[in-house]
Amino acid sequence: METFVFPCNSCSFMQDDMNSYGKVVITCCRVRMTLHVRLVLLGEELVPFGTCEIPIASSTSGTKIAIRGLSCSPSGVLSFIDSRGIWATYQLACQNTALVSTPISENLHLQRLTILKRQKPSAREGIAIVSLGTSLVLLAALVEGTQDISLQIWDLSYGVLLTAQSMPVPSSLSLPHLSLTVADEGQVLLTVSSPQRHEKKASPKHSLVYIVPVDPRLKSSLAAALGKTALTAEWVIQKTSNGQKSEEDDGPTKIISDIRTSLKKNHAQKAEQVFLKWLDSRSSKEATLGHEFVKKIFNIVLPPEPPTNYPYTPRITRCLLENAVVSTIMLNGRLITTLRERGDWENVMLALTTVADVSEDELMASAKFLIDRQCSGENAMDVDASEGYIPPLWSYLFACVSYPFTAAPLRLAIRKYLPDAQDLVVILEILENWIQGGTEHELGALLESLATNTQMPPSMADSPPYPKVITFLQALLDASFVALLQYQPAHDLLRRILSVIDPEINFIDSLEPLRGLLEPFVKVQLLKEKTDVSKESPAEWRRRKKQLEQRTGLGVGLYRLEELAI
């Protein structure tokens, strides 16, 4: 039985002529599979107003279902959680002389709670709820497979979880009783007490009280509920149109739960095996690895604030990166930073080839880390057992320069992370080696690839593409030229770079007249690459050439290409 007392003038579901009474008392009592709700007006005397009945479960569900948590707000939103994890919400209303209850949302089927696995839990064991006003409810519950209490704020009018935090269960308490009480504005008291056991020898009981701060400005609104589907899905069992769990949807949900449980128990290898085995059994990986699913996996493998000694599974991260299904948005734009903090530089380098939205801030932050490490006297080529693989600075810069960056954000990132001219000189020395040979070397490699009808992979190149190197060099000089001028050791380096760049400008000017002649061919080549035409065999190339010659003989074209074969 639960009783709620509210000031009459704060109850928005009451009729206007009832404001003369001081208090409103709502009592809830369970009788078999029905919850009896009674409203009493409290003034100079008790005035019973009305009673309504709310079914707890259907007649076919049995009689073992009990209510584990019940809440009510001054606006008349009544909710309760039964022993199956079903969370029902009703709106109370006073109509004439009757009390009426109406469902305001579909029932939620909770999961991952310890109370759902207990055969005969006692009242308040491992779960408690309290209303925060209107349809907002604070839930405190023990999480299955962990020693944590999860604190969650739900908006029951939209059926979504707004926010969640966790706290460890005191080691002296096992399966404690939980209780929530609203205190002053913006504060809720969480009481964690020893379970009441019926034993012959009474053991000492003790309780702990925590203050849970809550933003008093938090209100139920559609704007706050938007975008909370992924967070809600972690704690609610999804249903299909016929109300049954979908086996197809249960697969990813079960995998997420298994990985989370394995990592909580410090079984990283088991988590990797479970994920890789499940992925291999799927025929279409692109359909399986959806955005929301990958985001959930990443937030489990790489949590924003991992607990102490939380295991890391680089094989799961690498598998997702290799399938090109990862976005930095999944980790709030901190993918490279998070991997670097974990010491997983192999996946950092892989991410720079498979992830399309890495920010320039992250690129330069990691560059600064490697520069500091190199300048501290450590050899970046060595592999330390405690640190694992850390790439040399030139290797990381190769990936950064080859990455599709934008000049304006790159300049801002350089000013933010590389304000010291001494760090800039280290990068300029590497760029100086890459601009040697310039456009002439680039044209030579291009002609060689055309002659052999092959394309050299970027990993086999001595330096990044020359245009990318020049663009990166220009952004660096634009962002920090004044700082380099004030640093005397940089002057000789700048002169050497200028001596290489000047001939390139003259060489490009001499090639400019060829633009009009060669531009049509360039457009055809770009169109071919855009349409992803497969490479031709020599026989197919000769056949197509013969057809072109026959067509050319029928008329005079704009350009004629003569070929001398020796």
Image (cartoon, rainbow, N blue to C red):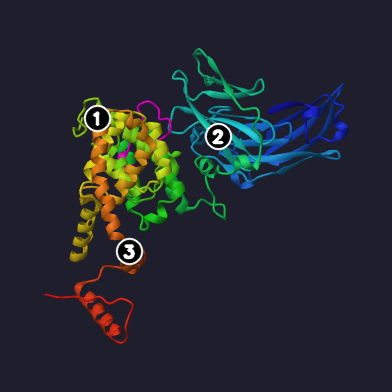
Compute the Cα span from label 2 to label 1.
Answer: 42 Å
Disc nearest the viewer among 2 and 1: 1
Extreme-left residue of the structure: 566
Looking at the rendering, which quadrant does residue 559 occupy?
Answer: bottom left
Badge 3 local density, few (<14 within 10 Å), some, or many (20+)? few
Q: Secondary structure at mark 3?
A: helix
Q: Considering only vertical position in the picture, is 407 above or below 514?
A: above
Q: Position of residue 538 (x, y in %)?
A: 19, 73
Q: Position of residue 434 (x, y in %)?
A: 23, 45
Q: Which residue is mark 2?
A: 163
Q: Which residue is mark 3?
A: 515
**Residue 305 among magenta residues:** yes
Which amino acid type is shown beneath numbered disc 1?
Answer: Gln
Foreground: 203 or 28? 28
Residue drawn at 87 percent across, 27 percent down:
20
Compute the Cα span from label 1 to label 3.
Answer: 44 Å
Foreground: 59 or 217? 217
Q: Position of residue 106 (x, y in %)?
A: 63, 46
Residue 49 shows up from this direction: yes
Residue 70, numbered circle: none
Foreground: 33 or 324? 324
Q: Which residue is mark 1?
A: 374
Which amino acid type is shown beneath numbered disc 3?
Answer: Arg
Disc with the residue nearer the chain's start (1 vs 3): 1
Compute the Cα span from label 3 to label 2.
Answer: 59 Å
Disc with the residue nearer the chain's start (3 vs 2): 2
